[in-house]
Amino acid sequence: MSELMPLTALHCGQFAEVGQLVGPSEQVRRLEELGIRAGARLEMISTGSPCIVRIEGSRICFRHDDSLRVLVSARMTA
């Protein structure tokens, strides 16, 4: 996997693979329940806060939270 960067660094239409979730365990667990977990592939649909990502055929919207970081590795294609 290439260098990890924050999910917020992705541009619309860019694909990435989740590398790591960092933050309070209850927030990390909630994202994992939604499918945002290490190894999952996603596409940034809309940037900002809230951002929208497509993952496993679903669109998920969540707000940026300074206590929670989703670190990803950018990919060239799906």
Image (cartoon, rainbow, N blue to C red):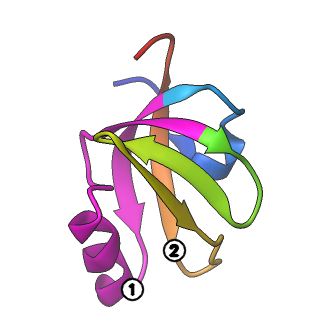
Q: In this picture, which residue range is highlighted in magenta? A: 16-44
Indicate whether residue 42 is drawn in magenta.
yes
* Horizontal and vertical percent position of residue 14: 60, 26
x, y percentage for residue 21?
37, 62
Report crowding for label 2: few under 14, some 14 to 19, many 20 or more residues within 10 A (C-alpha): some
Query: Badges 2 and 1: C-beta atoms under 8 Å apart?
Result: yes
Report the side of 52 relative to 21 (left or right): right
Q: Residue at x 33, y 25 (%)?
A: 1
Nearest the eye: 28 or 77: 77
| Location of mark 2 (residue) | 68
Q: Nearer the viewer, residue 64 or 55?
A: 55
Q: Quadrant of residue 37?
A: bottom left
The relative height of residue 8 versus residue 9 in the rendered view (above or below) is: below
Q: Between 26 and 58, which is closer to the camera in this rendering?
A: 58
Residue 33 forms part of the magenta stretch? yes
- Taking the spot 69% from the left edge, 45% from the top edge, the residue there is 46
Name, please, the residue furthest toward the right.
48
The quarter holding residue 44 reads top right
Label 1 neighbour load within 10 Å: few <14, some 14-19, many 20+: few
